[in-house]
Amino acid sequence: MLDFMMKKFVYIYTYGCQMNVHDSEKMLGTLENSGYAVTEHPEQADLIIFNTCAIREKAEQKFYSQLGRSKFLKNKRPGVKIAVAGCIAQDAQRRVFKRAPYVDFVIGPQNIHMLSDIVCGDTSLHTEENPDISYRQYEMRRESKTRAWVSIMYGCNNFCSYCIVPFTRGRELSRPSSSIISEIRQLRQKGYVEVTLLGQNVNSYNSDMDFVQLLREISRIGMDRVRFITSHPRDLSPALIDAIAELTGLCEHLHLPLQSGSDIILQKMNRRYSYSGYLEKVLMVREKVPGIAITTDLIIGFPGETQKDYDQTVNAVREIEFDGIFGFNYSRRNGTLAYDMDEQIPDSVKSERLNNVLKIQDDISLKKNRALEGTNQEILIEGPSASNKHLLMGRTRTNKIVTIEDSGETEGTLLSAYIEKARHHSLKGTKR
Ligand code: SAH
Ligand code: SF4
Ligand code: F3S
């Protein structure tokens, strides 16, 4: 009883990409291990963590406005501690304290292994580099009992000229294969059916083996589904394409960020591939892995993007016919090369161009989804559908969302669904 009364509660806000989602699992695992309990109610928390994202200005604004609201919680309960973690912590460092003096701890992504100790102490900043990051083992409080994130590498060396990540996540470091493999083995024993390997550029994984060798080793563990994000087009090798074709556990989905269809812009972005080089790889992938889904990221309105450059992006979208795209207005990030480039594009132009390309893609997505009508697809049930609680949602191996009637299947069930109807961003199926 006493133990329960002394228990402290932690609440975490998570913004940004899958690495952050997984870092939050690590932070909560570490804290649980040292006696914290996780709460779903920020008002109840003794410790509030913001795991932040700095990728675009919008993400930053979202965080700061939420942080502002947490000040009132602190006024109400003076014992509450506030920690700012993640990419904004690393990028802004002391400026977080300046902007929000009620923040107690600022902790960069490379320092979360010290979290339990940090939160016992006084106000402090922890943004030093951690060269041991890839050797650490973490306690984890995984959100799902059936699908797991697995870090295979940290950081990024690519320095795409628009991107803040190399500054917030530090240099690229790969985890030893033995520790990745034993983690996945344990997950399999616990009943997990899907793992997603995480890295900013998984194709450049390089420890005691390369990425393709790692995939071959992982595939022997016998997970039903293995995914990985993100691939850099320059490093996508024919050997990797062969592996996707051969290895049964590897899902038929490739997220391959193109960013722009213009070679001039790609060069200014420091992406180190041309559109034709990208296209060639896409064609090779489609030839060797029929039915594979390919999705991409696009940045619209990079400095100097002319109407002609933009048209080339639209042409690329039409020519390749992606299964889905994530499109973003270019956002100026302090400290990056592109920040100071001439010819920054007005927001109104960016938004118009973005909306236009997304509209074009909508028709393509629908067309792609329609091709699946009348087929049977293996789906992995994730839980209730977000749009209708009475339906279940699952994903195909190609990462498409399928909703089906709820007949009591639990999360993690693999079943065959007959695709009745295609929508723009999902499919409607029935159990077969
Ligand atoms: N490492 C991954 C992507 C990480 S960020 C990769 O290279 O693919 C995810 C996406 O955010 C990027 O693919 C890019 O499309 C977008 N992005 C990154 N920086 C951006 C910026 N400054 N403005 C707008 N979008 C950006
Ligand atoms: Fe950013 Fe480029 Fe690294 Fe991706 S590869 S994280 S876009 S610098
Ligand atoms: Fe991810 Fe955002 Fe950091 S996208 S790597 S959390 S800047």
Image (cartoon, grey):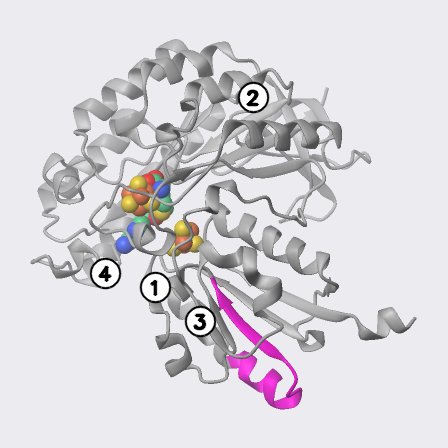
For the record, the magenta segment spans 69-85
Question: Which quarter of the rendered picture does the C terminus lie within?
Answer: top right
Q: Earlier in the sequence, mark 2 or mark 4?
A: 2
Tell me if label 1 and label 3 are in contact, CB under 8 Å.
no
Residue type for callout 3:
Leu
Say which of 135 and 69 sits in front.
135
Q: Earlier in the sequence, mark 3 or mark 4?
A: 3
Badge 2 density bin: few <14, some 14–19, many ≥20, Cα 10 Å: many
User: Taking 300 as reference, is 179 left or right?
Assistant: right
Badge 3 density bin: few <14, some 14–19, many ≥20, Cα 10 Å: many
Q: Quadrant of residue 409?
A: top right
Say which of 201 and 371 sits in front.
201
- Does ligand 1 reach within 8 Å of label 2's beta carbon? no
Which label sits in the foreground, 3 or 4?
Answer: 3
- Does ligand 1 reach within 8 Å of label 4's beta carbon? yes
Task: Check residue 218 in the rendering and tell me which mark sits there, or answer none.
Answer: 2
Q: Residue at x 13, y 59 (%)?
A: 344
Task: Check residue 125 in the rendering and tell me which mark sits there, or answer none.
Answer: 3
Q: CA distance from mark 3 to mark 2?
A: 38 Å
Residue type for callout 4:
Arg
The residue wearing badge 4 is 332
Residue 347 point in image, percent of width and height:
22, 62
The reply to whether residue 87 is in sight is yes
Badge 4 density bin: few <14, some 14–19, many ≥20, Cα 10 Å: many
Residue sitting farthest toward the right: 1
The answer to whether residue 172 is magenta is no
